Image (cartoon, helix red, strand yellow):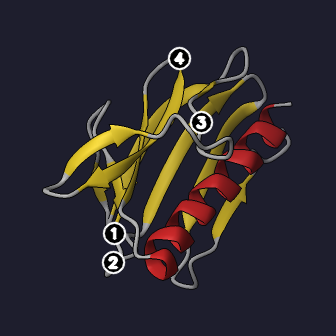
Amino acid sequence: LAAAEAERLGLLLETALQEAQWGGRAIAWSADSKGYRFLQGEGDRRWQPITDDEMFRPRPFAEGMGIAAIEVEGQSLPPGALLEFLPATAPLFRITLTAPQGELVLRSLHTGRVDLELPRPQ
């Protein structure tokens, strides 16, 4: 269940990245202990939650899941900070999720894809 949830988050982040790159739309992602949401940039960089789009709607984490760490370009992102996808830039990020079976890591690649690393079996 956690792996499927992480896989979905990876696909959503990949889609947000593509929307920003090709759609010219500024999108940001934010997570807390309960879940995550996407926001869109309005004019002078004011971020508004995306509420009218089924794909980018706010989502709760599955039971037992949460955020362990978020890194952007090698720098740690503080809790609640925005991971921004802007038309001109594609940041490299690494999101570590906690799950009942161990840590799951979502990592963006230079190609724009988001890779999921599953925990190694003990």
- The amino acid at mark 2 is Thr
Query: Mark 1 or mark 4, which has the lower sequence index?
Result: 4
The location of residue 24, given as percent across then percent down, is 40, 76
Please report whichever mark, 2 or 3, sits nearer to the chain's N-terminal start.
Answer: 3
Q: Residue at x 60, y 44 (%)?
A: 53
**Residue at disc 1, secondary structure:** loop
Question: Disc 1 vs disc 4: Cβ atoms closer than 8 Å?
Answer: no
Q: Is residue 4 above or below residue 117?
A: above
Which residue is at a point 67% across and 43% down the rendered structure image? Answer: 104
Q: Position of residue 11 (x, y in %)?
A: 70, 57
Is the residue under label 3 in contact with that under label 4 (CB below 8 Å)? no
* As drawn, 19 above or below 66: below
Q: Earlier in the sequence, mark 1 or mark 3?
A: 3
Quadrant holding the C terminus: top right
Residue picked out by circle 3: 57
Name the element at disc 4.
Answer: loop
4 or 2: tag closer to the N-terminus: 4
What residue did someone put label 1 on? 86
Closer to us: 20 or 82: 20
Three-letter amino acid code of the residue under disc 1: Leu
Amino acid tagged 4: Lys
The residue that mark 4 highlights is 34
Q: Is residue 26 left or right of residue 4?
A: left
Mark 2–mark 3 Cα distance, whole angstroms, equals: 23 Å
The alpha-carbon separation of the residues under discs 1 and 3 comes to 19 Å
Residue occupying the point 79% across, 48% down: 120
Residue 89, numbered label: 2
